[in-house]
Image (cartoon, rainbow, N blue to C red):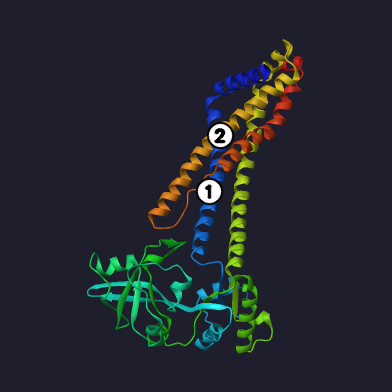
Amino acid sequence: MNKINTYFELGWKSLTRQKSRTILTIIALSIGIALLIIMIAAGAGLKSMVMRELDIYSPNTIDIEVKIPGKQSASSTMDMAGGAQVTTFKNSDVEALRKIENVSDLYSFITGQQIFKYANQTKSTIIFGYGAEAPNIEKIDITSGRFYSKDEEDSLAQVTVIGPKLKDALFGDADAVGQNVYVKGLPFKIVGITKSRGSGGFFDYDSIAYIPVKTMQKKLMGTDYVVGVLAEVKDVSKINETKSEMEYLLRERHNITDPERDDFAATTMAEARVMVQTILNGITLLLVALTFISLLVGGVGITNIMYVSVIERTFEIGLRRAVGATKADVLGQFLSEAVILTTIGGVVGIVIGSGVAFLVYYIATSFGIAWSYSVSLVSVISALAFSAVLGLAFGVYPARQASNLDPIAALRRE
């Protein structure tokens, strides 16, 4: 133990004699470690945010959404975002799905964007055309008023439920429930205000409006199709059977004989969670892998700096060997220098990374994004351990070069 302490004392003295070089090396390493902490924290924050969005649905739900036949859901979604439409999912399909024995509740949905007007105020907002059963399946909390009823949906009533930010933009501090807003020149009565829910990703739920799906179809969009349904099952143990029954029913109604040509995609909430977790874990691993590249570059820098140090201190090494220092002593001193460099760089990097991760969290939450601050003890210990291992791994070669110098030849180099 005394020898190890001596190695680190000598290593520290050597590093402090070259302050500028030492500081620059520490900065380079700390940036790599900081990036590692930031990437791990970002991956955890993103995962927490997305999984929190899935938590608004109970585990006994099935989501069915339209897709372009013959395409995977992801590429189909991109195409539809670019303007492609699938109009085969009709209201009659929704009613047929509703009659499946294990389905307890079901609502259909469409989305659009319109301008809401009240007095001299206007606000462009995203509209969710939701079935009246939506609050039975999805967590839609109302702070004032109520959600619209099934009778209002069936009678094409011009009613709406709006988010708190949309309410503030149009009405300020005034009461909005019972007031009329105009959408495409039609009066819509506000019957409820939702509880603040924040943003999901880059989507602000507090600025949207809900309108009965049939009202939105007939009076705002002039269509008879939906983009999907969300169903809740009675017996969750039969959820996969129910999903298969729904798929069979839709294929029969849409004259689809090849499942590869489905114009819809059905997913249970359990499947959705696994799929999302797999994607997010993959993204996190990719980010961490890219960060490791910068750390490896920093490690090569350590090797170069230590090698230069060996060349500059050849006489010192020869002198130490001449007065009795062993190869192991020289090896230990140079390895201790590398470990000191990387450990300090690791600590500084952890502090910087944790600070940046907190700044991201603060900015995200100030914009209403449900982000979480996640710098775990495991990631901190891992970063410190990795930085120490990095020092040993990349310090071995120059340290061995130093320990293998011939004392006589080293003294002659001075």
Which is nearer the eye, 299 or 107? 107
Q: Answer left or right for 211 relative to 121.
A: right
Question: Residue 134's quadrant in the figure?
Answer: bottom left
Give the numbered dot on residue 319: none
- Type of residue at label 2? Gly
User: From what the image shows, is residue 254 above or below residue 126?
Assistant: below
Q: Answer left or right for 218 relative to 61.
A: left
Q: Please name which of the two marks, 2 or 1, marks the residue nearer to the observer.
A: 1
User: From what the image shows, is residue 321 above or below residue 299?
Assistant: above
Quarter of the rendering occupied by the N terminus: top right
**Numbered circles on residues, count:** 2
Residue under pointer 2: 345
Give the numbered dot on residue 41: 1
Q: Position of residue 220 (x, y in %)?
A: 38, 84
Q: Secondary structure at mark 1?
A: helix
> Residue shown at 41%/54% (left/top)?
365
Q: Position of residue 124 (x, y in %)?
A: 34, 72
Q: Position of residue 270 (x, y in %)?
A: 60, 66
Task: Say whether residue 27 is visible.
Answer: yes
Q: Position of residue 328 (x, y in %)?
A: 74, 21
- Type of residue at label 1? Ala
User: From what the image shows, is residue 311 above or below residue 109?
Assistant: above
> Residue shown at 52%/86% (left/top)?
95
Q: CA distance from mark 2 to mark 1?
A: 19 Å
